[in-house]
Every structure is written in structure tokens, then in C-alpha cells.
Amino acid sequence: GVLKQAQAYDSCRKDPFLAEGTTFKINVVSYGGHVDEDTKRSIINRCFDYIDFKGKVKMDQTRKGVRTGRGPRADNQFWWLEDVGYVKGISHAKDLKPHRRWFCREIALGQRHLLDKYDLKKREYLCSTSMTAENSFLVANFAHAGKGKLVFDPFCGSASLLIAAAHFGAYTLGGDIDIRVIRGKEKDAKLPSHCRYARTLKDVEIGPLSNFQQYGLQPPLDLIRCDSANPIWKLGGIFDAIVCDPPYGVRGGG
């Protein structure tokens, strides 16, 4: 089984994470199923039978890889993962047993708490094709957006992708053929409830730049009106990355 494989790992690969003076926690998660508390304890006890943990147990508030508390986490997070393969409407979860298992060490969290902070429902300025927070961060991550890099979005719209890039510390620049999207709209007393922050702004209009102000991010170097079918940039590569969601269909005006 997976625990015997972990037991057989070379000492140089596992001893640094099992040493005295460190803290650890064992997490149990089932994909497509449910693990009750008794089963969790049984699995954790089996881990101790195969692996020589010399550190101290430290419990923290983490649920399925998402940090739910503010306290310090254990130095080393170990995960027992099960895949039941449950498909709603096709299989019956209660009758299924895990067909794949893993025991592994956590390298890093996925920062899923950012999805709530940057949720479109809480964002001040949106347009009909604003990209969701999760997809925006995935694209910015693929583009390796980071400190000191220049990232351009030729179809920026409400700047969802640029917001994600700016969160990672990148300089941003946006363009769009629709000047109305870049200019924004006039503040209205009938703003939706999720636009409460807009009511505190002194500006007469709200637009893409208002979103950067809302999150405390460095604003774009500029937002310009341009047609990407006729590039305005000279050849030579001035950007570290280009991120975009090109317009398509009726809503995108394509």
C-alpha cells in the first residue's frame, strides 16, 4: 500500500520532515465520498505504525487545503487522499470504496482564500464578460505574473485579468476597443448591494481603475483604447506576458 511505499523512501528524502523539533499534522480527505471521524482516526493511527514521526503534533484550522483559521500552521502537513470516483446520478457513494489512495506532504497551499476576496459579487465595477476570480488567477499564474514584470491585456474590459496580475506584484497595462468600458459609468444611487464600496468613492464615475482602488492594488500604467486587429506596438517584445480573454459571441460584440 501507499504507507509501505512511504516507509521505503530513502531516509534523506523523509527524515528532514520527521525530525525532532518540528511539528506536523495528518489530514484525511476523500474525493467523492465521506470519511467519518472513527475512520479518520484509524487511518491516522496506521500512519504512525508505518512512519517514524519524531516531531510534535500540531492541530490547525485547515479544511480540504483551505486555511480557515489565522493561527500558525504545523511545520509539515501530511495528507491521506482517497478517490472514490463518485459521479452524481450514476454511482452510489455509500456503496463505493476508494479505488486510489495517496499519502503525501503538502508543498504549498493553493491560496483559495483569494477567491472570496476577489469574488465578482463583491467587486465594484463589472461588465458583461468579466472573468471570474478563479480563472483570472489561473491565467495570471500561467503567465508567471510577478514583481517587476510588465503584463498587458489587449481586451481588458473591467480588468479582471490585470487585477490578478497586479495582486502578484506585476506592472499592468490594458487596452480595449470599447472606450465606454474603459471610461466606466456614472455613479448611481441605485447601485447593486455588492457595490457598496462605490458609494464611498468621491469620483463621479466608476470604472476599471475603481477595482484596483477597492483592493488596494497598484493601478495600471494606463488603460488605452486600441484595436488589436491593428497593433499599435512596434516589434521587439516589450511585455513579459500578454494575458487576455478575446471577445467572442454576441455579448463580446464579436
Image (cartoon, rainbow, N blue to C red):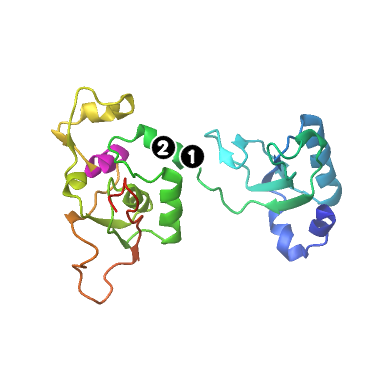
**What residue did someone put label 1 on?**
113
Q: Is residue 145 magenta?
A: no
Quadrant assignment, res 58: top right
Magenta segment's dominant SS is helix
Residue type marked 1? His
Q: Please give the name of the residue rendered at 20% of the width and 69% of the height, measured from the top-left corner.
A: 233
x, y percent for residue 37 = 77, 30
Q: For the magenta stretch, what is the residue range?
A: 208-215
Residue at 27 percent across and 43 percent down: it is: 212
Type of amino acid under label 2: Lys
Secondary structure of the residue carrying tag 1 is helix
Q: Secondary structure at mark 2?
A: helix
Q: Which residue is mark 2?
A: 117
Q: Is residue 77 above or below residue 6?
A: above
Quadrant that contains the C terminus: bottom left
Locate residue 99 relative to residue 232 in the image: left or right: right
